[in-house]
Image (cartoon, coloured by chain):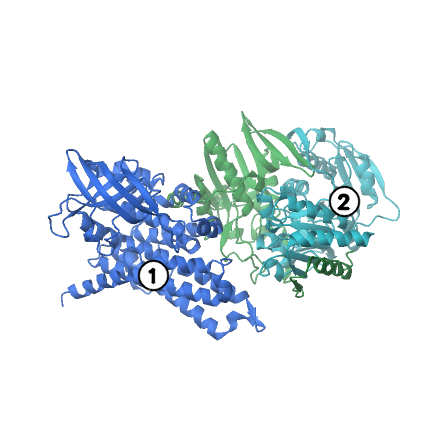
């Protein structure tokens, strides 16, 4: 497929194109196909996934079969070689129906990004085919109980022992930690080094002895997406699984998040759109005082603001994807901007959707209360909204006058 | 006087004339009277006599063509070849054909269209004879209701010949006061069409009015909940003298046979009364039934689209309404 | 096994309308005719099981390629699109002539077509195509199974089904019972961009001098109108079962249906 890196999409955006015009034919076709799949196969499962809080293995298989999990991976290793915007279009379309299902692709990308960014050709050849086919799921293990926003403060250790590293410690809040075959683990290799040179990244196969899932969290939203606490009890990892050089880990984690946050923004835009669609349809049908509630201006105001916030977040997301894909020097700023705006939009729009539905919106007979619970996480993970503001402000202040 | 109108009667598995053939004959007879054309019926079958006699109840002349090979061959090519031969032998070639809009009728129409080089108008819902207009000669005007009845159209043939496929239940079959005569007829071979062998005929359906012919249809959808739910609908259909239909959701779920499916990829029906239970009324279903004279819907969901085009919409739980309605109908019947 | 599937782009069901000229407005978003998707699925399964390839054959205005791309994305090998300004307003007789002529330029063992089309088409074209080509014609199939040199089809009948056999090449018309069509995979969608859609004019399929197309239509639309809207219906909300039953019975009596 054509990559925006060729500059064409970027140029086209300059001439105030309509919302569709900025997408290539491939991007439109893929978005439409995923949207159809989401409407027909994912949406009918969403309430049950939320209720049971079980990982939707059937939908993982569906995403794998349809090639959706292969989107972020290079073609030479069995992927589809899609650009970031295309991956985000797919996450958005899935999340409009079910945020948990959208997250399957977002986490697959997040977990694999360190490998894609820093892996050698040998490492890519070993791990990517399984990920691209969707047979293997990936997870990203940086956060620890006492190192969340302050990621450099992690304590998990990796000690070199001949041709292996021995990893010990624990990770917390790891999406897909219990269903992944491969986990990218960030661990301290040199405790004495400078704060940002202490850490290295490893691909850990979860079948390795000493790896275990110590607990699963009970969450407010994205309830079908397992969030695990992982224990590493002297897990031996071949030295060949070190990504990049020793000490590269922290920078790699930050580069990964620069590229993965748009996926969360896409999830947020999808959730907002899903809630807006439900609210608009409801307002057209629900009658009070002898007319559809959508005819009341106070309701119209809510709907219009919801649409404006959703569309603004979407356009910022698409621009951020294009900027990051073309290698913009302030990629981190774009990534933080879109996550910040989209996460807040999702929270506001889903809250208003519940308002439009009134008492019915508060019942689990309608999907908006689920969407509201799901939206909250987009303000928290892959950096809280407060961290996004820090990233943006630092980028601003670092600019040369 | 121009060419004749020919009506090809269809026979069912038992060799009897189908109900729709009587309707087609009645429609053709009215057309012939209005246009001043002779109308002739044709029955091609291994044993055509019974069906030909039935068709003669509606038409003054019926040709019975014995085609023993039809017992072991797919019908369309056999019938098409005989009709081409009859047309070649006729004093004047027939001008119009009125056939049934059934699978067999469509197959036959497609073949006759290219063999006789004439046009086809499918799915007729009404038939009149009209004077020349808009560059179209005097002849049949065919009413259709495409897109599930969202448009009404009137069409004609640009030449003075054509094939019309008539949908079920569009006219009421009316016999002649004095039945017509049956003429046994043999045909020579004019065209040689490849024949398709019938290896086996498997009978699985119990006889009863087919949904295309039924005056009352009791249809079930996803809301029926399962195959057991259809038992209640069958009882209602029995009490009302109707047939059971289904939406695609119910067929896809395996609760009931495809033969009962109404809608875009199923059958198009026009009963006097359509009773829908747990059918949401999605457009794919609507196009198959919205021309029913009276639509009554029962569904739990007050926002179900069927509420927008039902004449009576009862928002209620089916599980309770179906037995209550059955009880009320039994009480009425005494 | 070389299979040609006849596919027809139709307006998205529910969106159809007639243009000012009385012809079908083809500017509304087009999709593959639903019944054609079932036979395409059957064709893809046959090719997966027995080897071979699937060629799509369509007659449509030049601009309408999205539905054909989608069918390619589902797994068809290539497409042939017969398009010619002269074909606007073509009747079913013309369509039959065109598809048969196009098939004469292709190599195949089996031609598959869907039962009737959702845009008001009558499902008569495939029978005519088979007749023009002198091929066995098997319709209303719920199952298609090739065997050495032939094809066995279960044809739905009013009472059940008939088992039919014919030699190849043959023309088979299928129904929804052939099985749910697949979703095009993303790989299929991206691969479809580079698949060939061979565009053919009437002259290129040898029909330049034949009386086909809109100017030679055997049928003509004389008038089109919207039906009178159904009067708005009566709604009974949340009655008890006995009240619901009597509301229905009363209504049936009122409509003289009892």
Residue B18 position in % (x across, y down): 75, 42
Residue B117 position in % (x across, y down): 64, 43
Could you tell me which secondary element the residue under label 1 belongs to?
Answer: helix
Which residue matches tag 1?
Answer: A343
Q: Is B157 displayed left or right of A176 in the figure?
A: right
Residue A87 position in % (x across, y down): 34, 51
Checking the image for residue B19, the label placed there is 2
* Picture layout, residue C224 above or below residue A129: below
Colour seen for chain C: green
Q: Residue at x 24, y 53 (%)?
A: A146
Q: Which chain is blue?
A: A
* Picture layout, residue A59 above or below residue C18: above
**In front here: B45 or C217?**
B45
Q: Residue at x 82, y 46 (%)?
A: B58
Q: Is residue B158 visible?
A: no
Could you tell me which secondary element the residue under label 2 belongs to?
Answer: helix
Q: Which chain is cyan?
A: B
* Picture layout, residue B118 above or below residue B70: below
**In front here: C104 or B330?**
B330
């Amino acid at each position: 497929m054509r990559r925006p890196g060729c500059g064409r999409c970027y140029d086209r955006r300059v001439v105030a194109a309509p919302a569709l015009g900025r997408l290539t034919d491939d991007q439109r076709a893929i978005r439409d196909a995923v949207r159809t799949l989401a409407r027909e196969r994912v949406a009918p499962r969403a309430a049950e996934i939320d209720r049971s809080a079980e990982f939707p293995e059937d939908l993982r298989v569906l995403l794998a079969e349809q090639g959706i999990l292969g989107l972020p991976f290079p073609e030479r290793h069995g992927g589809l070689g899609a650009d970031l915007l295309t991956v985000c279009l797919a996450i958005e379309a899935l999340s409009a129906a079910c945020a948990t299902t959208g997250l399957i692709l977002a986490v697959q990308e997040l977990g694999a990004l360190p490998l894609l960014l820093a892996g050698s050709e040998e490492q890519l050849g070993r791990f990517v085919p399984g990920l691209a086919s969707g047979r293997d799921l990936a997870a990203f293990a940086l956060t620890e109980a006492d190192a969340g926003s302050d990621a450099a403060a992690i304590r998990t250790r990796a000690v070199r022992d001949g041709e292996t590293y021995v990893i010990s410690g624990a990770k917390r809040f790891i999406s897909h930690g219990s269903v992944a075959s491969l986990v990218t683990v960030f661990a301290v290799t040199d405790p004495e080094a400078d704060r940002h040179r202490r850490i290295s990244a490893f691909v850990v196969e979860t079948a390795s002895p000493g790896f275990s899932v110590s607990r699963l969290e009970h969450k407010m939203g994205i309830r079908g997406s397992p969030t695990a606490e992982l224990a590493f009890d002297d897990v031996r990892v071949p030295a060949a699984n070190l990504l990049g050089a020793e000490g590269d880990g922290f920078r790699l984690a930050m580069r990964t998040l620069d590229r993965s946050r748009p996926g969360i923004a896409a999830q947020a835009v999808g959730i907002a759109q899903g809630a807006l669609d439900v609210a608009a349809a409801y307002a057209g049908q629900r009658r009070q005082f002898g007319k559809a509630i959508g005819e009341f201006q106070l309701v119209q105001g809510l709907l219009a603001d919801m649409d404006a916030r959703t569309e603004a977040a979407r356009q910022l997301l698409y621009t951020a994807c294009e900027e990051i894909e073309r290698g913009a020097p302030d990629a981190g700023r774009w990534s933080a901007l879109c996550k910040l705006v989209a996460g807040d939009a999702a929270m506001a729009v889903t809250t208003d959707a519940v308002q439009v539905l009134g008492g019915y919106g508060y019942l689990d007979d309608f999907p908006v209360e689920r969407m509201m619970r799901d939206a909250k996480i987009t303000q928290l993970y892959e950096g809280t909204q407060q961290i996004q503001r820090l990233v943006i402000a630092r980028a601003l202040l670092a600019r040369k006058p | 006087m121009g060419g004749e109108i020919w009506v090809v009667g269809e026979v069912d598995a038992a060799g009897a004339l189908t109900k729709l053939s009587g309707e087609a004959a009645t429609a053709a007879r009215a057309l012939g009277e209005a246009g001043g054309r002779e109308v002739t019926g044709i029955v091609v079958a291994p044993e055509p006599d019974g069906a030909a006699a039935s068709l003669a109840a509606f038409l003054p002349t019926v040709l019975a063509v014995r085609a023993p090979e039809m017992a072991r061959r797919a019908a369309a090519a056999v019938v098409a070849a005989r009709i081409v031969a009859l047309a070649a032998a006729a004093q004047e070639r027939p001008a119009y054909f009125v056939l049934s809009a059934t699978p067999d009728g469509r197959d036959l129409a497609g073949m006759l269209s290219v063999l006789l080089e004439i046009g086809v108008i499918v799915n007729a819902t009404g038939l009149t004879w009209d004077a020349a207009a808009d560059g179209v000669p005097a002849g049949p005007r065919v009413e259709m209701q495409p897109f599930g009845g969202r448009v009404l159209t009137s069409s004609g043939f640009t030449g003075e010949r054509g094939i019309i496929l008539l949908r079920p239940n569009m006219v009421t079959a009316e016999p002649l006061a004095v039945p017509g005569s049956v003429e046994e007829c043999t045909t020579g071979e004019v065209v040689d069409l490849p024949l398709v062998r019938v290896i086996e005929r498997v009978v699985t359906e119990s006889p009863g009015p087919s949904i295309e012919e039924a005056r009352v249809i009791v249809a079930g959808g996803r809301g029926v909940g399962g195959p057991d739910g259809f038992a209640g609908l069958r009882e209602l259909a029995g009490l009302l003298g109707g047939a059971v239909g289904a939406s695609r959701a119910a067929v896809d779920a395996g609760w009931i046979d495809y033969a009962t499916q109404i809608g875009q990829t199923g059958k198009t029906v026009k009963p006097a009364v359509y009773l829908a239970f747990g059918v949401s009324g999605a457009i794919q279903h609507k196009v198959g039934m919205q021309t029913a004279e009276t639509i009554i819907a029962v569904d739990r969901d007050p926002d179900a689209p069927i509420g927008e085009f039902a004449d009576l919409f009862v928002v209620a739980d089916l599980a309770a309404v179906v037995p209550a309605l059955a009880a009320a109908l039994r009480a009425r019947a005494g | 096994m070389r299979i040609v599937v006849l596919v027809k782009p139709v307006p998205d069901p529910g969106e159809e309308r007639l243009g000012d000229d009385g012809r079908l407005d083809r500017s509304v978003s087009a999709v593959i005719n639903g019944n054609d998707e079932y036979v395409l699925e059957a064709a893809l399964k046959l090719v997966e099981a027995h080897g071979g390839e699937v060629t799509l054959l369509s007659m449509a205005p030049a601009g309408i390629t999205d539905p054909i791309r989608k069918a390619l994305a589902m797994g068809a090998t290539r497409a042939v699109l017969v398009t010619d300004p002269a074909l606007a307003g073509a009747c079913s007789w013309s369509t039959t002539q065109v598809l048969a002529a196009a098939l004469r330029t292709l190599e195949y063992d089996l031609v598959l077509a869907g039962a009737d089309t959702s845009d008001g088409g009558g499902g008569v074209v495939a029978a005519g195509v088979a007749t023009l080509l002198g091929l066995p014609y098997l319709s209303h199939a719920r199952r298609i199974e090739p065997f050495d040199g032939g094809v066995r089809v279960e044809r739905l009948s009013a009472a059940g089904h008939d088992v039919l056999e014919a030699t190849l090449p043959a023309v088979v018309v299928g129904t929804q019972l052939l099985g749910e069509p697949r979703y095009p995979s993303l790989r299929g969608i991206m691969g479809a961009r580079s698949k060939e859609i061979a565009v053919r004019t009437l002259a290129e399929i040898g029909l330049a001098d034949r009386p086909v197309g809109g100017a030679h239509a055997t049928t003509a639309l004389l008038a089109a109108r919207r039906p009178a809207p159904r009067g708005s219906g009566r709604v009974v909300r949340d009655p008890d079962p006995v009240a619901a039953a009597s509301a229905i019975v009363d209504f049936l009596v009122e409509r003289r249906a009892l």
